[in-house]
Amino acid sequence: QVQLVESGGGSVQAGGSLRVSCEASGVTNSMYCVGWFRQGPGKTREGVATMLRTGGHTFYADSVKGRFTISQDNAKNTLYLQMNSLKPEDSAMYYCAATRIPTYCALGAWNVDYWGQGTQVTVSS
């Protein structure tokens, strides 16, 4: 089993930056793909950025390309999402996720086995 705990959300004005983190514990080497998803008010949950847990092979939603960067520190078992040039439409609950099934790690290509509890990001105009 894997436990995922997000942190770092908050409120920021449009154009600002935030970094959210996700610390993994448990059988962390069982994770294959890891990533960030978000769900805004009245919206369905969507993939934001994903990557191979061992590094590389990053994928981004078109809406965040060039503004968000996914990265990880395997020594700390921590996944990050650096968010720059934030827009009000980026406001959402951000969730960390992972799968244990070896697969292609692109957005929409894998099913989530583990979810974090989420961290709220609010961008004001």
Image (cartoon, helix red, strand yellow):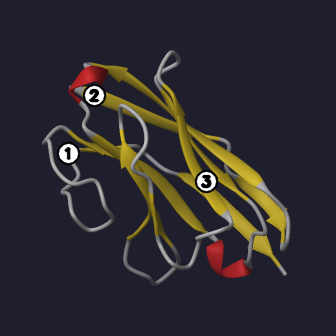
Q: Secondary structure at mark 3?
A: strand
The residue sitting at 63% across, 45% down in the picture is: 20
Q: Nearer the viewer, residue 116 or 110?
A: 110
Task: Check whether the beta carbons of the residues at disc 3 and disc 2 lie within 8 A of each other.
Answer: no
Which mark is first along the chain, 1 or 3? 3
Circle 3: residue type: Thr
User: From the viewer's perspective, is residue 75 above or below residue 91?
Assistant: above
Q: Which mark is residue 113?
A: 1
The residue sitting at 47% across, 34% down in the picture is: 5
Please indicate whether residue 18 sits to the left or right of residue 20 in the image.
Answer: right
Q: Which mark is residue 5?
A: none
Q: Which mark is residue 2?
A: 2
| Mark 2 crowd level (few <14, some 14–19, many ≥20, 10 Å Cα) | some
Residue under pointer 3? 69
Q: Position of residue 72 (x, y in %)?
A: 52, 34
Circle 2: residue type: Val
The residue sitting at 74% across, 77% down in the picture is: 87
| Mark 1 crowd level (few <14, some 14–19, many ≥20, 10 Å Cα) | few
Which mark is first along the chain, 2 or 3? 2
The residue sitting at 83% across, 74% down in the picture is: 14
Q: Secondary structure at mark 1?
A: loop
Q: Position of residue 120 (x, y in %)?
A: 61, 57
Pair 3/1: label in front: 3
Which mark is first along the chain, 2 or 1? 2
Q: Position of residue 115 (x, y in %)?
A: 33, 46
Find the distance from the CA under tag 3 to the CA under tag 1.
Answer: 23 Å
Task: Check whether the beta carbons of the residues at disc 1 and disc 2 lie within 8 A of each other.
Answer: yes
